[in-house]
Amino acid sequence: MKTLITYIVIIGIIAAVIFLLSQQGVSFVPEEEKQTDTDGPGTVTLDKATLADIETSFGTVTVQLFPEDAPKTVENFVKLATSGFYNGTSFHRVIKGFMIQGGDPNSKDDDWSDDGQGGPGYSFDDEINTHKLVRGALAMANSGPNTNGSQFFIVTAADTPWLDGKHTVFGRVVGGMEVVDTIEAANTNENDHPLENITVQRITVSQ
């Protein structure tokens, strides 16, 4: 009987661990319920070789964007980047062996309590495609289906299959992955916020 009880307990623990891993994602807590307005993704001229240099306080990360596979998402990112929206934001969530997350306008100040809750004031639909969330992938953070705004993340793990199909991949790192690794290695508090602000100075897009 003791052996049977022990077996049942072990099975229960394994099931709980699998469930928790399957639920871990890259999210943000929206300040309001989902809203859509006409100031969302616009009409930015794009081509197949669109590149973006994310200049951070730790160095520059170059990403290749995927306008053919995620056109609305790329348009939104380019629009926000070229308008200076991301300038001064921080990588507010860093998890070793997983990813680094940024793009929240709330992270521009010294109040960390609301970091991860901000956005551009609108949301737009997912563009799930064939790109996987593997090391170097650039993807949108969200709070559920079709809640994309401005927050993005870069994967540092080899792969994250539990995220595939849940986040729009719209680019990949093609230069400066060592900068991403340095950001990932930063010391963080209990909320995964780096103990020193790691800022995005500006993002420049070349076409």
Image (cartoon, rainbow, N blue to C red):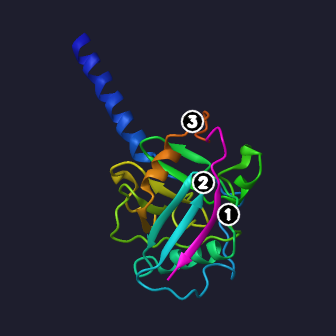
Q: Quadrant of residue 76?
A: bottom right
In-front residue for pair 18/8: 18
- Start and end of the magenta stretch? 194-207
- Assess disc 3: are there few (<14), some (14-19) or many (≥20) residues with their C-alpha within 10 Å of its C-alpha: some
Residue 80 lies, in percent from the top left, at 64, 73
Q: CA distance from mark 3 to mark 1?
A: 25 Å
Residue 198 lies, in percent from the top left, at 63, 49
Report if the CB atoms under discs 2 and 1 are less than 8 Å apart.
yes
Instruction: Please tell me whether residue 166 is drawn above or below residue 191 in the rendered image.
Output: below
In-front residue for pair 189/62: 62
Question: What is the residue that sits farthest to the top in this orientation?
Answer: 2
Does residue 59 appear to the left or right of 80 in the view shown? Answer: left
Residue that numbered label 3 is attached to: 187
At mark 1, the secondary structure is: loop
Q: Is residue 205 on the magenta stretch?
A: yes
Residue that numbered label 1 is attached to: 119
Q: Earlier in the sequence, mark 2 or mark 1?
A: 2
Instruction: Give, as a three-letter code, the residue at label 3.
Output: Asn
Q: Quadrant of residue 112?
A: top right
Q: What's the residue at 35%, 39% (across, down)? A: 18
Which is closer to the viewer, label 3 or label 1?
Answer: 3
